[in-house]
Amino acid sequence: MIRGSTRVAGELGLHLRAAARLVSITGEASGPVRITANGVTVDGKSLLGITSLLAAAGTEVCIELDLEEDAAVLAAALACLGGGDDDA
């Protein structure tokens, strides 16, 4: 299992467009993805699940993937949430 965490950087928080971009990234993972924020864990490949986190700017988000081979997906997802992706 691999995991990482970051804080939501976008001033609008994890809004629908940013969540859709995140789903596009996590969808590339070979195994399951779990995203946790505000004490709630959801399927990281589910747009509805991610938007239900209600992650405002500054919220700490943890991402867990089961497969080591998905390390690039983890890095891209963390960059998206942390402001390293222009679509976030």
Image (tube, rainbow, N blue to C red):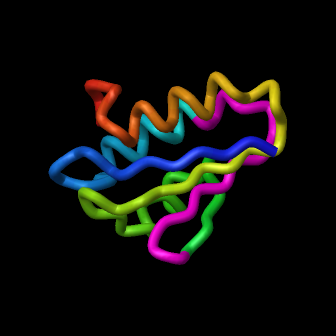
**In terms of depth relative to the viewer, which is nearer, 13 or 51?**
13
Image coordinates for residue 28, horizontal then vertical, percent: 66, 27
Which quarter of the picture shows residue 51? bottom left
Magenta-colored stretch includes residue 70 = no
In the picture, which quadrant includes the N terminus? top right
Q: Is residue 27 above or below residue 14?
A: above
Q: Residue at x 60, y 37 (%)?
A: 26
Instruction: Tell me what residue is drawn at x 33 percent, y 53 percent.
Output: 14
Image position, residue 86 (x, y; %): 26, 25
Write the residue at 41% across / 47% down.
Answer: 19
Extreme residue toward the left, this view: 11
Q: Residue at x 56, y 63 (%)?
A: 36
Above or below — where is 52 with respect to 60? below
**Residue 26 falls left or right of residue 47:** right
Residues in magenta? Answer: 26-39
Q: Quadrant of residue 35?
A: bottom right
Picture quadrant of residue 18 = top left
Tell me where residue 85 appears, x and y as whole percent. Answer: 34, 26
Q: Which quarter of the figure is the C terminus placed in? A: top left
